[in-house]
Image: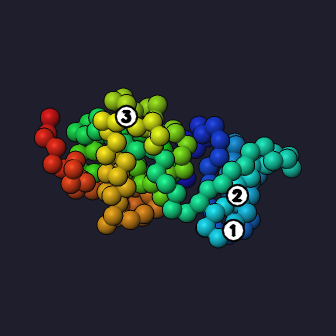
Amino acid sequence: MPENISKLPWLFIVEANGDPGANVLGLRGAPSRIISHAHQHRVEIRERGSIISSGITSEGNTLTYIIAGPCIDVKDKSCIEECPVDCIYEGGRMLYIQPDECVDCGACEPVCPVEAIYYEDDVPGEFSEFKSINEEFFGELGSPGGASKVGAQESDHPVVAARPKG
């Protein structure tokens, strides 16, 4: 588990696997619990027996954060260091967020020096194509369960690869 997990202001799921009662880590290690129904999980963060936060997560979640055009040929990687779940993968010319692995914590967004990371509802029109670019990059790669497991990829999404360098 990455050391920077303690920086998260809220929920981080350590291991769910759809099991009712699976252990999770909440606010500063507060005891938490997952109550599972089909492919949705209700997550409760408890402190001294009281629920202090709860929410719903599901498998195959929609894309939450995306990396857009300003990252092309920059790849600063500050976001990789901040990501507590290792869901930011390196392509040949830019970085990509794996939508099924992202937990929507937002830790990556403020550290990007070129402001290339956006919440899906806040993507400027000029970068709207990057919603699908981030998803489609993982077509063959799938969801390996962490970027460090597969390392940097030499390829990019065809739209990114076709952009002029510079």
Q: Is residue 44 left or right of residue 104?
A: right
Q: Earlier in the sequence, mark 2 or mark 1?
A: 1
What's the residue type where badge 1 is placed?
A: His
Q: Which of 9 and 152 is in front in this view?
A: 9
For the residues labelled 1 and 3, the Cα–Cα distance comes to 35 Å
Q: Which of 146 and 116 is in front in this view?
A: 116
In this figure, which residue is indicated by the disc labeled 2? 42
Toward the right, the furthest residue is 49
Element at badge 2? strand
Q: Identify the residue shown where x is 62% and y is 49%.
A: 12
Q: How many labels does the image show?
A: 3
Q: Where is residue 127 in the image (x, y as percent from the top left)?
A: 32, 39
Toward the front, the furthest residue is 125
What's the residue type where badge 3 is placed?
A: Pro
Element at badge 3? loop
In this figure, which residue is indicated by the disc labeled 1? 37
Q: Identify the residue shown where x is 26% and y is 36%.
A: 74
Element at badge 1? strand
Q: Which of marks 3 and 2 is nearer the N terminus?
A: 2
Q: Identify the residue shown where x is 22% and y is 39%.
A: 73
Discs 3/2, front: 3
Tell me the quarter of the image containing the C terminus.
top left
Q: In this view, does 134 lie to the left or right of 164?
A: right
Q: Identify the residue shown where x is 30% and y is 35%.
A: 126
In this figure, which residue is indicated by the disc labeled 3? 124
What's the residue type where badge 2 is placed?
A: Arg
Q: Which of 147 and 62 is in front in this view?
A: 62
Discs 1/3, front: 3
Q: Where is residue 159 in the image (x, y as percent from the top left)?
A: 21, 50
